[in-house]
Structures are given as C-alpha cells and as structure tokens.
Image (tube, rainbow, N blue to C red):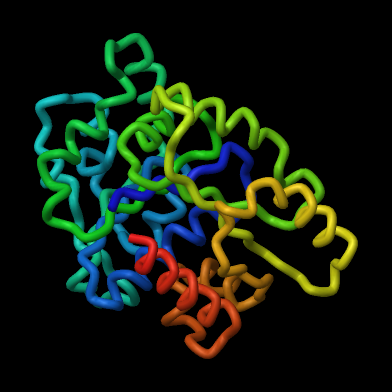
Amino acid sequence: MKIGILNQKGGVGKSTIAVNLAYGLAANGKKTLLIDIDPQAHSTVIFCADVPREKTVREIFLDRAFDIRKVIHPGQVNGETMNELSVVPAAIHLATVAEQINARTHREKLLHNHLRRIENNFDYILIDCPPTLGVLSMNAIFTADLILIPTTYGRYSLDGIADLFATISEVKESDTYNYRIVRNSFDSRNRVSNHFIDEQLAPLQASLLATIIRKNEAINQAQMNSEPIFTFDPRSNGAQDFHSLTREIAAHG
C-alpha cells in the first residue's frame, strides 16, 4: 500500500506522523519505504544523518530513466540500521525541482512511474509531502492508494480542506478516492476548541481514524533528538498512540 501523508496547512504534524508510522510498521516486520518529498526534509533527518546531494529524491523527478534504487538508503536510528526500513531522502535543493518540471507533460506521474519498478519489494510506501498542493504533492496524490490527512484541534486547522479534496479529485480524475483523517495534538483540557473541531469533522465521520494522537511533550523532545517516539520514550502517551495508529493502518491495509 502506498500512503501519501498530506495537508497543505503546515504545523499539523505531518512529518511526525510519517516518521513514527514508518518506524512502527518496520518494527512490526513490514518492509517499509519512507519517501520524503518535502524540501524541509524533516523526515530525512530522523533516519538519514548524512545524505550526498546527488542521492536524494530530487534525481527521480528530474530524470525519468533514473534508477530509483540508487537513492534508497537504509533507515538508521541512533546509528543502528533498521532491516525493514528504507528511506528516499530529501534536501533543501528539492525546492527548485517544482519549477523545473512544471511544464512537463504527465508531470504528476513522475513518482508513480518510478515506484512501479520497486513497489512490489515493499509492504508499505509512505510519502511525506510538503505543505503545499504543488506538483510534488500532486505526484504523491496520483500514486497513493490511501491519502492520510493529519489535522489538529486548532481553530484554523481545517482551513483549506475543501481545496485539498478538490485537488485530490482533480489529480485522481474521480470523486471517489481512499482517504483517512488522523487527529493530532489532542488536549482534553481544551473542551471548547475540541467540541468545535469535532463538529466540523462530523460530516467526515466515516473517514476518521479511531486513533487520536494526544498532545505529548515527549513527541516534541523526540523530534529535537532526531528519534522516533518509540525509541526516545517507549512508555509515553505518544508511543502508545502511535502504536495504536500503526495497528489501525496495518489493519486498514
């Protein structure tokens, strides 16, 4: 299953979810490939400490004939390689790629065509998207079997979600597509905000994942230490919630 983790709104925990879900699936024996197509490279820094400039995801967008296997790196945590986790890293120079490929025909299919050559080697391919609905995100939308949309319990967290659905429909050329919403940074003390967001999400109830990621300082600290929450603080609420998310996604798959 190919999963695009996408929201054009920043600050919703997209990369956090990508990193910890990838680790959770790999730790459960699933051969997992995490592809970072966000120039900020937040997923990359967790699993790939040093990445040569010419061995990033940029190459597959610029060259249709490029062998994607040349930019697949083993995932590492605290210097140790995870056998079931592989990463296609990003770097800041990916930001210029969108301008270079925008005029190409079938530009939204570039990633899909590369993945066709290797997708049978993995149980899950996760794609961490940039916080925009540009050509890079469109590539993830086109190839994804499932769109995973993180949202938070902030007042403006759902702004633009109609535009997101419109873009998915346009790229998929269908009003029927597979997506799930994962609620992130839940704080039970914020009753008014929580109630408001729950009301806004009510029409999408059938597409809400049961798992809710609670706001948890250990998750922030894990990011600062460039670790998944599972290794940084395995007993934290954050680790428990991501265990639950991993099981739910695996069952869905």
Residue 12 location (% of width, % of height):
62, 52
Residue 230 location (% of width, % of height):
44, 80
Of 40 and 82, which appears nearest the observer? 82
| Residue under the image location 56 percent in, 42 percent down | 7
Which quadrant holds the C terminus? bottom left
Left or right: 153 with respect to 6? right
Farthest residue in the right direction? 192
Of 163 and 226, which appears nearest the observer? 163
Give the total of numbered labels: 0
| Residue under the image location 26 percent in, 42 percent down | 56
Of 124 and 235, which appears nearest the observer? 124
Position above or below: 32 against 83: above
| Residue under the image location 37 percent in, 54 percent down | 44
| Residue under the image location 44 percent in, 69 percent down | 248
Position above or below: 223 against 53: below
Residue 15 location (% of width, % of height):
49, 55
Position above or below: 206 against 236: above
Query: Which quadrant of the structure image shows residue 68?
Result: top left
Left or right: 182 with respect to 192? left
Residue 130 location (% of width, % of height):
48, 39
Position above or below: 134 against 216: above
